[in-house]
Image (cartoon, coloured by chain):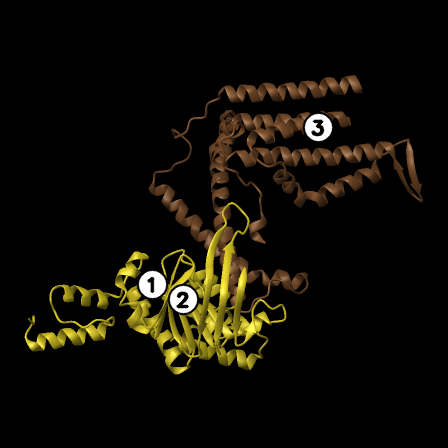
Chain colours: A yellow, B brown
Amino acid sequence: MSIVIEHLNYIYMSGGPYETHALHDVSLTIEDGEFVGLIGHTGSGKSTLVQHLNGLIMPASGRVLVDGMDLSDKQTDRRAIRQKVGLVFQYPENQLFEETVEKDIAFGPKNLGLNEAEIDRRVRDAMRRVALDYDALHDRSVFELSGGQMRRVAIAGVLAMEPRVLVLDEPCAGLDPRGREEILGLIRDLHREAGTTVVMVSHSMDDVASLAERVIVMNHGEVVMDGTPRDVFACGEELRGMGLDVPQAAQLAQKLRERGFGIPQGIYRIEEIRAEIARIAAQGGRHA
Amino acid sequence: MLKDITLGQYFPGHSPIHRMDPRMKLILTIAYIVGVFMVSNLPGYALALAFLYLVVRLSGIRFAYLLKGVKPLRFIILFTFVLNLLFTEGETVLFSLGFFTLTAEALESATFFALRLVFLVMGTSVLTLTTSPVQLTDGLERLMRPLQRFHFPAHELAMMMTIALRFIPTLLEETDKIQKAQMARGADFESGNLLARAKAMIPLLVPLFVSAFRRANDLAMAMEARCYRGGDHRTRLRELRYTRLDAIGALATAAFIAVVVLEGRLLG
């Protein structure tokens, strides 16, 4: 199931004094099973773009096709689209409202009109995927949980819709390092085990580097780069010019190169730079 | 939907009307409304319209924009008009159908009531469009200050208004975000009967209240951290001062009221 975006434009507060052109002629295709990292500084149009993917906002011009269905078409069933494309907003724990964890996660499946047994199965399954213990937590109040647990409940609420595509807007924002690791781990597992297509919006180049197979860079409402992490993170100057940066491993590789160490180009992962440093250390330090 | 709310909207500018003292603007708005309510014939309303038009022209706001502000109230105005039409007693019968009789007096009184409402809304709109919320509450606080002698919490009231106004856009944005998040989980806010729609609001209202209380708590803490302890001994960054503009405005409004009263006497 692919998502095709054709010449998408979006304008906020059209016609008013505060009109802003948020998206400018964006065209891209997200294939089934991909893991896409979407990066760009604040106000680059990332969040606006992801809200188009399940029809929460409608294009000013251009088309978005999910599984061949045009989202602007009045005939298209919005709820079916929102079931296929799950969207986890920034700080999703702010949307929790039910009395218990179980009821909150069941909100989405209930809206889909599923029967009790199926809802129960999905709640248990979603909780397992986000590593929350069903027996211990299902009847607890969502407001008694820790920040990281609340975030996972909110993600489970979207996973319970069993979407084919999962879109996450800054899923790790405001979490401590351990919470961040846990969230990234569950996204990785979801992609690898369930084969879910993932689009992850992030400010953290390291998060994107550790997970994404494809990186899309946005600037001023336009897609400016689109390629493998290796190709995109090789353009350090351009990224810095847009208020972004490269992953720490790539920064370290660059610094070592400047000091005269023979580190090959295109390194952006922690494991790669670790291997390179080990290789150089084994050779006995600085080479000619 | 939420973006269409223009209540209390402020149009930044540097016109003479913008530069007037908020206290004077508040007083003159009230005076103008009192003046409009003293009008008792059509030429008087023409005068009130001319005066309002002059003020709006001076402020640099498009008159059409002001009329747009009346639009949401059209049903209330229509309702008042119809009620007055039906229940005003009169002798000069214009039209009669069964138990319903339309009299000239009823038509006159209904028209005047509707016009008064329109002028009330437009007059206060000029005030809110040309005065920033901060200035407005500042002006209110100063006007209410004499009442503090009778333990009237003027400063607290003004501070509450300032905070409420400050958070309207924030909470609107928050509402929009939560609504979208629930829609992403298949929630439906647009269809169903009244009960279904009211129930659909729960997933929206609970998170909104939670976040509003959290914000209130944070704000209270931040204010205390900056040693806020109410209005006593507080000095201000911008002292309010009456200028020549205010004198001109006061004279013009006084002249308007005088003409309205005289004209009412002359024409009956």
SS at badge 1? loop
Q: Is residue A153 rendered to the left or right of residue A59?
A: left
SS at badge 3? helix
Please, is residue A186 above or below residue B13 in the view? below
The quadrant where residue A140 appears: bottom left
Which numbered tag is attached to residue A175?
1
Q: CA distance from mark 3 to mark 2?
A: 58 Å
The quadrant where residue A35 appears: bottom left
Question: In which chain is the residue bearing label 2?
Answer: A
Task: Please provide percent x and percent y for residue A210.
Answer: 30, 72
Instruction: State yes or no: discs 1 and 2 in contact (Cβ < 8 Å).
Output: yes
Amino acid at the residue labelled 3: Phe
Residue denoted by label 3: B37
Q: What residue appears at the point 40 percent right and 77 percent down from the top-left corner? A: A34
Q: Is residue A77 rendered to the left or right of residue A261?
A: right
Which numbered tag is attached to residue A70?
none
Please, is residue A282 above or below residue B105 in the view? below
Residue A220 seen in the figure = yes
Residue denoted by label 2: A151
Question: In which chain is the residue bearing label 1?
Answer: A
Task: Please provide percent x and percent y for residue A212.
Answer: 34, 73
> In front: A16, or A145?
A16
